Image: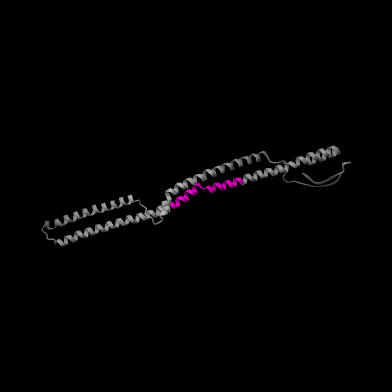
Amino acid sequence: MEIITKLVIDIESGAVLERESYAYTGMVLWCKGPSADQKALAKEQLAFTRKLSSAWDTRFAGQDEIIKGLRTSLEPILSAGIGQFGYTPEEEAAMRTKASETTSKEFTSAAKGLGEKLAARGSGNVFIPSGAEDQLYAGLFGQAAEVESGRQQDITKSGFDTGRSNYLTALQGLGTVAQIQDPLGVAGQFTTSGTSTNKTYSDIAAEEQAASPWGAIGGLVGGALGAFTGGLGSGLAKKITT
């Protein structure tokens, strides 16, 4: 295609006095304006961007409500700190009672067995000093107390271990829910979509602006030249508008 950059014509004779041009072989898309597909794409992009905007509002509101609910249940755990005791008073009482009852049953049975052994020695004819028998029972009861103490200490340790675990789980829970909702991720998609939509509409506007002067100039030149130059003007106008 020939692009004329300068053209001087004698109005009376129609002779071309001066002409400057160059051959152009590049794209001419913008001279024709935006295509129907491009305009349809712009509408689809705009609709999608609006959907993302609505999704942002919905997910952000949803996250806010969930966070409020979690705070109600988790903040007391976080406020108690990592060194908190993890059992409720009712749970602790039940565990300690069960431990004591187990110890009592075990050593009641052991004391009964000891008494039966003492009574069976020599069919009851072997003399056992009263002090020695008391020492045997005292040793048995001492063992019972030691076992009971150990079990109670285990419950105490388990309670603090559970409290530490509860604290760390609560801390992690808040972050996990925020990641699942991910409002910033939706916001990023919305921003990207908006940028793409804006570019498409900008391209369409630029193409329409570029195409409009070509039609106007071609029509004016064709009409003017045809009026005063006859065939030369018509031919030239045809070349310009082609």
Residue at point 80% right, 39% down? 220
| Residue at image coords 16%, 62% | 131
Q: Residue 117 location, x and y as percent?
A: 16, 56
Quadrant position of residue 241: top right
Residue 34: say if magenta: no
Determine the residue positioned at 55% across, 42% down. Answer: 54
Residue occupying the point 75% across, 42% down = 214
Q: Is residue 124 above or below residue 2?
A: below
Horizontal side, residue 212 vs residue 101: left or right: right
Please provide percent x and percent y for residue 204.
68, 43
| Left or right for 155, reference 120 | right
Quadrant of the rendering where the C terminus is positioned: top right
Magenta-colored stretch includes residue 173: yes
135 left or right of 198?
Answer: left
In the rendered image, the quadrant that contains the N terminus is: top right
What residue span does the magenta drawing correspond to?
170-194
Predominant SS along the magenta part: helix
Percent position (x, y) of residue 186? 55, 46
